[in-house]
Amino acid sequence: MPVLKKSALETYLQVRFGPSAELLAYGPIGKETSGARYKQYGYGAPVRLTFRQGGKTRRVVLGTMSPGPFGHEHPADRAQAMLWDYDCYGRLPGHIDALDVGAFTARGELMSVAAAKEFFLLTEWSEGATYHRDLERMAGATKPTALDRKRTGALAGYLADIHRVKQADPQLYRRRLRELLGHGECIMGLTDSYPDRFAFITEDLLQRIEVACNVWRWRLRSRHARLSQVHGDFHPWNVLFRHGTDFSVLDRSRGEWGEPADDVTSMSINYLFFSLCRHGTLKGALEVAFHSFWETYLAKSRDHEVLEATAPFFAFRGLVLASPLWYPKLTVTVRRKIFRFIENVLATARFDPADVNRYCE
């Protein structure tokens, strides 16, 4: 990303919001200390801008995407992601608003896209704490608090609500399954990002997982009636809780429509992950939250068929969590349990939440 200069930022804000806009402060939004315990890698470095407009102070976020693996090598790759974000954020209930999409020129100016070198996305700032903080706290607790239970239910209910919106498009459903396997940010992009060998993780192991996921793609491709409104990246770092169960979601990704199992697995595997990191198994408050999440979602969505679609999506999320790039500080023991979970779930025709610990053996 070009070096951000106050003059360029203020000129952009005046073009976008009016000549009275005055930039007061700007700076990177750093990683939270607790989050850095596990997760290290990210796609970009967002910057918060604070400015005055018409007597009011506003805060917005300027998001960029860095060159790198996972299908982000070319400027056009990164531009595609930003343009999609701007188009789709506002159509998902509870998502922060995208205010603008623009680009940097070679001289570091922010302007319309005709002379673009790199793109950026401008969104509203939202107060709140990311949900991973709750999971880290729950990892040390024997049982969830009343608020923990309410928040788990709120997240599961939110997914059930958005997934009720369906889209009749068989080819789009097949595309989404195809992208689960072949998209740069998904399964093959992840396996390609692993070292040739990392502890027990070999090329043969990664290839077996790819092959098994492709079998699942063919198993699911006729179930196009399941195509639903989705978030696409519904993990704890993309959920901001404020007071009680009031929350916003961030950074929906890759597709406005998709398989509901994508969202449900993205959140639920993190209850398992945070417990594995602390205990080596799913137990205590996180075990209660895991089962409560699934029970609430199944009851409210009435979609028990989702249990027959989770396997390749769990594989995708497991490959992220076990990644030496994304999570470099994990122990070999935790990575091994995640890979056992991936392989056992892929070998199971129907996921059973009650068997989650057995899948890790």
Image (spheres, rainbow, N blue to C red):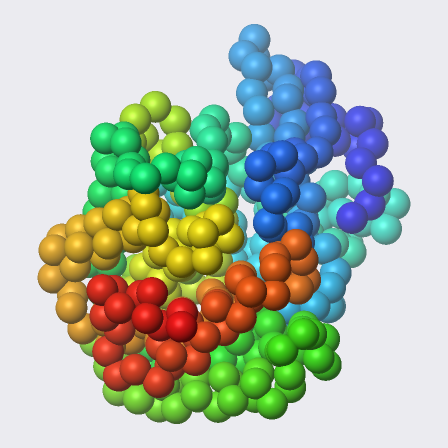
Residue 340, image x and y in percent? Answer: 45, 75
The quadrant where residue 349 appears: bottom left
The quadrant where residue 315 appears: bottom left
Q: Is residue 6 left or right of residue 340?
A: right
Toward the top, the furthest residue is: 55
Query: Foreground: 262 or 276?
Result: 276
Query: Foreground: 276 or 74?
Result: 276
The quadrant where residue 328 appears: bottom right
Residue 65, image x and y in percent? Answer: 67, 53
Q: Is residue 8 left or right of residue 190?
A: right
Looking at the image, can residue 16 be seen? no
Q: Is residue 98 left or right of residue 199?
A: left
Residue 30, image x and y in percent? Answer: 67, 35
Q: Total marks drawn?
A: 0
Query: Foreground: 236 or 224?
Result: 236
Q: Is residue 298 left or right of residue 129?
A: left
Which residue sits at x=22%, y=49%? 292
Which residue sits at x=30%, y=26%? 244
Looking at the image, can residue 45 be seen? yes
Q: Quadrant of the C terminus?
A: bottom left
- In this picture, is 1 found above or below 26? below
Which residue sits at x=53%, y=70%? 336
Query: Foreground: 108 or 178?
Result: 178
Which residue sits at x=80%, y=41%? 109
- In this picture, is 132 found above or below 294? above
Residue 152, image x and y in percent? Answer: 28, 43
